[in-house]
Amino acid sequence: MTCKRAVSVGCVVRFEQLQTVHSEKVKIVTIDMIEDRARQYWLLARFDRPIGILILLWPALWALWVASNGKPDLLVLTVICLGVVLMRAAGCVINDYADREFDPHVERTKQRPMALGNVTPKEALIIFVVLCLISFGLVLLLNLYTILLSFIAAFLAASYPFMKRYTHLPQAYLGIAFGWAVPMAFSAQTNSIPFVAWVMYLATILWALVYDTMYAMVDKDDDLKIGVKSTAILFGNYDRHIMAILQVIILGLLVTIGQMQDLGRFYYSGLLVGASLFIYQQWLIFNREKSQCFKAFLNNNWFGLTIFVGFFLDYYCRA
């Protein structure tokens, strides 16, 4: 009897041990799965590559500093900055969803999560909606005018990735879509969109057209093979010349903003440095080498920063 009881107790103990081991294994597998999903979503939203966030953020900061005369409201500044980060992420997600059939055939994009099959189209759409909803929640903290403008922003961001199927100007549409942060920044800060905001918006659109054409030059050969349209293809052998003209126009628009706002030497010094960066970019893309074109694209971050520093110092020294 004692032996039977001992065996019974031993079986119970063994069962409990096996159950504990199984629970630990399930816990480890669950944690690993969650970490893997989080990592794939992080990569899908390109949070590992902040250059895109910065390039889109600079015009929004230009707008806020001009709209507020160098003293932006803290809430508005926070919402606009977070909104740019989130909507850029949403734009990357919907872009990969739209290009899921193309990306595996393009050298630069074939390692992205959707191209590798690590994220499903359904998951991508869910992530896109979640990012948009969080962004909209932030916008609700601002005035009604800005809330209404956010619906236009959402439409532009969602439709942008599909433009390369229908037009050779998706780079211009990128500027229209993500440059929308400029009028939104003015409306959030002043509850209005003055003429200077539209001048800045135009400068931002043309700037996006330039730097995204440099980006498209990297993919030009692959895009021609798979039938994707871009300004790099449209401009052909005149790409450098057209971008040079656009860069001159951008600088002219920024000078116009300086005159409209009665800005001083710090701002124009920033423009002078910005002009030198444009010249450097032209030198980089001269032979249309892919690595140099990508380097020119990255250099635009410094252009955006330089212009912002000019705005910041000019308004700061006025105070």
Image (cartoon, rainbow, N blue to C red):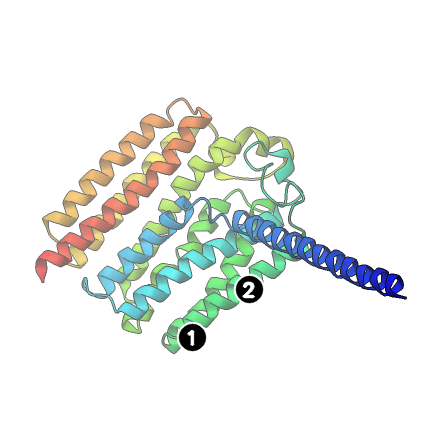
Residue 132, image x and y in percent? Answer: 51, 64
**Residue 58 vertical placement versus 116 (above, below):** below
Q: Look at label 2 and name its amino acid.
A: Val
Quadrant of the snapshot with the N terminus: bottom right
Q: Look at label 1 and name its amino acid.
A: Leu
Q: Can residue 199 be seen in this view?
A: no
Give the residue displayed 74% in from the left and 59% down from the top: 19
Q: Name the residue under label 2.
A: 130
Q: Do the residues labelled 1 and 2 touch (CB within 8 Å)?
A: no
- Asked whether, in this view, residue 16 is left or right of residue 285, the answer is right
- Asked whether, in this view, residue 134 is left or right of residue 63, the answer is right
* Circle 2 residues within 10 Å: few <14, some 14–19, many ≥20: some
Front residue of 298 and 286: 298
Residue 296 picture quarter: top left
Residue 306 picture quarter: top left
Q: Name the residue under label 1.
A: 140
